[in-house]
Image (spheres, grey):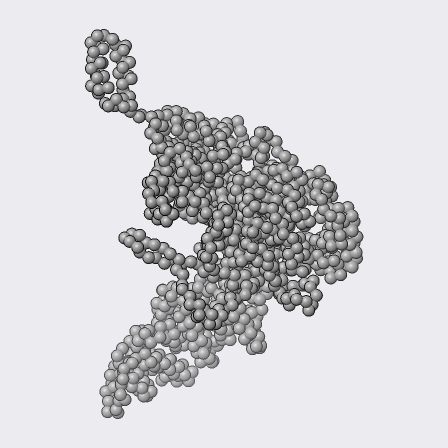
Amino acid sequence: MDANVIPQVIEYLSKKGYSKTESMLRQESANQDVDGRPINTKAEETGGAKYGKAFGLMRSWVEESLDIYKPDLRRLLWPVFVYSFLTLASDFSPKDSSHFFESFKSGFEKEHEDDLRALRPISLPEHVLNSDVAKIYRGNKYRITLSQVAFLNLVQFLESKEKDGGAVIVGVIQSHLQVITIDRVADDQNSLARLLKRARASEEHPAEDEGIPGHNPGSANVDRSAGSTVLTRLKLGHMPLESDLMSDVRAELEEEDAKNPPVSGQDSLIQHFEQRIKREESEDAPTRSELQLPPSIARDVAMEVQKVKEDRDRFKIEGRTGGVGPGVSVTMFTFHNTYDSINCLDFSEDNMLVAAGMSECYIRVWSLDGKALPTMAQPGSTEQPPSASRRLIGHSGPVYAVSFSPSVASSNPLAPSTNSKHLLSCSADKSIRLWSLETWTCLVVYKGHDHSVWDVKWGPFGLYFLTGSLDRTCRLWRTDHIEDLRMFVGHDKDVDTVCFHPNSAYVFTGSSDRIVRMWAVANGYPVRMFTGHTGNITSLACSPSGKILASADDAGTIILWDLGPGKLKKRMRGHGKGGIWSLSWSVESTVLVSGGADGTVRIWDIAIGNDASGQGRVIGEGGAGQKIDGNAAQMHAVAGAGTKKKGKDVVVTSDQISAFPTKKSPVYKVRFTRQNLVVAGGAFLT
Amino acid sequence: MSVWNPENIKDVAESVGITSLNDDVLQALCSDIEYRISQVLEEALKFMRHSKRSTLTTQDVAQALRALDVEPLYGYESTRPLRFGEASIGPGQPLFYVEDEEVDFEKLINAPLPKVPREITFTAHWLAVEGVQPSIPQNPTAADSRNQELVPKGQSANPHMAAMSGNENVTVKPLVKHVLSKELQLYFEKICSALLDESNNEYRIAALASIRSDPGLHQLVPYFVQFIAEKVTHNLKNLFVLTQMMLLTTAMLENSNLYVDPYIASIIPPVLTCLVGRHLGSLPDALAAYDLRRLSASVLSSITKKYSKSSHMLKPRLARTCLKHFLDPTKPLGANYGGIIGLQAIGGPEIVRALVVPNLREYEDLVKDAIDAMDEGKRHEGEMVIKALLEALVSLEEESVGAVNGFTNGHSVEWRKELGDKIGDLFAERVLELGKPRLVKAIMEC
């Protein structure tokens, strides 16, 4: 149609008095340019660019919104960013997606560094279907909790800006997010005061119930259909002693008491056993029938007796006496000339041996006292001469974890030996090996994992062990079975670290998907799930009391989880970046020790909380060092956080008792002995 | 758009016989390659992380390829980090390649075997004892770990601040005094009593030797400083105690494991007291105090040598004090003496030239009085001062270079006159008596 026709027609219509037809034509022709092509006024019709426009619009709106909603709304930016990007990559051109990524990635680097790195190269639809990270995001709905008012504000804004891109955002939210709104007046947990407090915390940390795949708010329940109040009941008590074993131990203790009467002021061994150690069947303890263990032998009796002795004579850490943290002693074993080839370390519980897994596929065991290692081989045979260290050769890939079987220092030479007899190791060659520490040979090769095995741990009673692998599974094994007994499947990425509950009825797994899961051994079901880490989980440790789990990530955060209610207890920060390789609890479960890549051993107080002071967020950190208190500080932090993100990364929370730096030696392993001395091991790097 | 160079793909395509490649295909392949590489790297990082390393090795990449079901690249495994050479094949087109030395097989076979790398060993030490990190060589010093964040800071760290901002359930730590372990306390007492024990020489020497060399005494430094200050103030009459305190100071300064810098300001006053004090020791044997003054001067000299770098005002301030005591006629000769040797100790010839020589003429009268005095003791003191001054002057000679061919007697009268004008007759005479022409020259040049 000729461009001049319409005005002519309109003129004609008005002349003739067809006013209704005329106005209709005017209206309809308004959306066409002079050439008669439709004009795009709606943002969603501009192709790939619409996402960039819409996201920019939303981001600037979030930054301008009221301070109390800002933290909530800011958390919304990340999922919208990711889903927009993935949609762009799969439906539009690579140019659009990379342009979008580069222009909006700033601001997410701190919390989502790894994800950003994984997403950046995605540019083609095939990649979206192939990439692990993209699969996780596309396959699940991102769960986020918003306060009702904030959510209504958002919806209102998006509707008012519908044509400028609001509709795009609405689309993303509808199809990929699961927004849960909570009325903050009704819910005590989300009162205004609480929200204000959380404002500061959530600047840096996701809420516990945020992320993928969602679960019930404030609940560790893995079953999404169950209500938030329904949690599987856990039996966190100690495993009771076998009755035969108990009577044997008692007899032995009485004999021991008669031989060496206790020093004045000291309990006799039998008293100590009855009062503190004795474990009987109780309601919150698993029964012995749930876990199959062989009948006790003389070695078990000797071990129990020695444990009672060590427990009585230990260095007692009785909380904070006079407000000062307990003074803990640390012995550091530094390895030299390693050329960074040590992958992992383990100390035996009898403090006699140390084992190192090497990247050169072998394991090396030393005796800590420098004496020759005992061997069963007959003298004069082809065995190598006795020496203080031995190599165990068998793996065909780097060894990633070693673990000594449970043991106790033996004080009585006549009693059966209670030393560590076996060593487990796992490697990139997908196998786990069991080594004898008497003949120094490999006894069993356990195969089952599909990829390299990252971690292996002995169960607290021996016999059982646990492995975690790159194939995203965690498996439970029994040394006398060649195949795994249980497979714990559920993590979206590698299972990096595993750990047993002290009663052996539960196991924990930590994964690169930043989630810690708890599983019941008896039936293999998941019973708890803990989210909140912002880095890959590098280490786990359950307290001897069985009530608290500590998990650490490579961003330098340690989180304590209350197992019963499944809640985050507190977040402890202080370690530098690069991974906290090991955690260990004191006998009393009041002190935690950690060691990591930053070359420090740090001691943490469990009893005091740091929650009230904004999860350790330092007000005015790294800036002019101004000190503001009360509300002013909160408002300031909220207002200033957008612009002032720089400053020191490392913040040390107030519940750190002390930190001991080493000389350029990353700490691979820390362990509290049964007498509350800390043993640490690391390699000196030149 | 893509980081990967499309030319590269073309080359590969041509090598398999595809000569014309669509541009779109090229782009798609480019971004796909980029994605695959990052996928491999992402996987390799996992292996690096689990090896607890911070550098990615070729082995990590090989493992990652295996994990992704790809055949690993062989031939790159190396214990050393790979070195990349750069070759330019065109403008803006650098080509990187792995530098691989050509090895002559003959040579390799005949070469002696390479050294066996050292065995992995381990050592044990105390990283902390009852919550305190001992300062032993195996542990980093306070200076090493200064840039690490070790203690809580900020609002949350200070319980008082936290309590003020309405924060409940804050456990308030009591103000903790410097906690000393029992062993250290005992050690301190033993050392103190040993030093003050006049009868047992061996015991004293052992104590000083211990302070001179033992690591781990850092916590005791403030206590020793306090001890020295107190003993010096209260025992001005007791030369033995003062001497011991100076020896203790020297021993502390000599211990390389101690970080004394912050305490220098508190260490100096006792040393100065022993150097230029009005009356040291009991009167009858006033001369005995001169030994002490000499000792203190040497302590002072070692302090200035060691610490004038860290506090640049140290030297000028000490020089001013010494000069004041040197030129004050109301002070006894002992104090003057201290001032002189102090000056020499602080700055050597330079200071002597700048501060001592110009003042000698005026000072001469004072010394003359002393030498002419009836009192024998005073005369001796005068002699000591003259000796000190001469020594100071002699140091000038060592400094000066330049050949002076011995002077003849004929000149001596002229020289004497000139010298007398410059530094006073008394000193001129003494200097000439030494018979050192170069010294005379050096003084004249001042």
Please tell me which residue lies in front, A343 or A591. A343
Which one is in front, A477 or A513?
A477
Furthest-bottom residue in this view: B409
The answer to which image quadrant residue A30 occupies is top left
Q: Nearer the viewer, residue A676 or A464?
A: A464
Drawn side of residue A18 relative to residue A399, left or right: left
Residue at the spot 31% in from the left edge and 52% down from the top edge: B93
Q: Give the answer, above or below, for where B428 lies relative to B119.
A: below
Count of number-bearing discs: 0
Residue A676 drawn above or below residue A571: below
Picture quarter with the N terminus of chain A: top left
Could you tell me residue A24's position as x and y percent?
28, 13
| In this picture, residue A202 sits left or right of residue B130 | left
Q: Where is residue B441 in the image (x, y as percent from the top left)?
A: 27, 82
Residue A312, given in percent of the width and then of the height, sits at 70, 53
Q: Can the viewer see residue A68? A: no
Could you tell me residue A367's position as x and y percent? 62, 62
Q: Quadrant of residue B268?
A: bottom left
- Residue lying furthest front in this view? B17
Tell which residue pokes out farthest to the top in this image.
A17
Q: In this view, does B121 lie above or below B294?
A: above
Question: Who's the residue at 49% across and 66% down the image?
Answer: B257
Residue plotted at (67% across, 60% down): A439
Depth order, front residue of A677/A449: A449
Residue drawn at x 38%, y 76% is B341
Answer whether residue A180 is visible to the viewer in this image: yes
